[in-house]
Amino acid sequence: MVKNISYYNFDIIGCYAQTELGHRTFIRGLETIATFDPSTEEFVMNSPTLTSIKWWPGSGIKVGDIGPKLA
């Protein structure tokens, strides 16, 4: 049985969130922090500054419901 059938019916649109407002595509300059919380077994994502806000690259996709976030 397939889990999360919404993905396969294109009900959910994905995107790739690497670009930051202040760093564009310069990966080594990323400010976003991912910290693992063992009590919930989840990653807590934090964009601590205005320049660390995830931003769409120039002509990239403009919408997305979910997506991997680089930190």
Image (cartoon, helix red, strand yellow):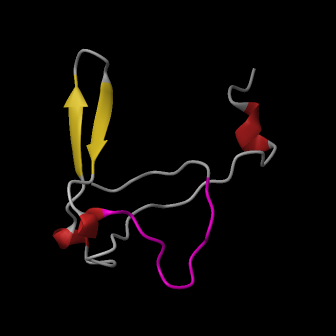
Q: Nearer the viewer, residue 49 or 69?
A: 49
Picture layout, residue 34 above or below residue 5: below
Say which residue appears at 63% left-offset and 63% top-offset: 63
Q: Position of residue 31 (x, y in %)?
A: 19, 61
Report whether 27 appears left or right of 16.
left
Picture layout, residue 37 above or below residue 57: above
**Viewport quadrant of the N terminus:** top right
Say which residue appears at 30% left-offset and 43% top-offset: 45
**Viewport quadrant of the C terminus:** bottom left
Report whether 28 appears left or right of 24.
left
Q: Nearer the viewer, residue 62 or 18?
A: 62
Picture layout, residue 31 above or below residue 62: above
Q: Is residue 6 magenta?
A: no
Q: Position of residue 69 (x, y in %)?
A: 39, 53
Outermost right residue: 9
Segment tinted magenta in the rendering: 53-64
Outermost top residue: 39
Q: Nearer the viewer, residue 50 or 37?
A: 50
Q: Quadrant of residue 28?
A: bottom left
Outermost bottom residue: 58
Report whether 1 appears left or right of 47.
right
Report whether 47 appears left or right of 18.
left
Q: Nearer the viewer, residue 15 or 53?
A: 53
Say which residue appears at 18% left-offset and 71% top-offset: 29
Picture layout, residue 3 above or below residue 45: above
Q: Position of residue 61 (x, y in %)?
A: 61, 71
Say which residue appears at 50% left-offset and 84% top-offset: 58
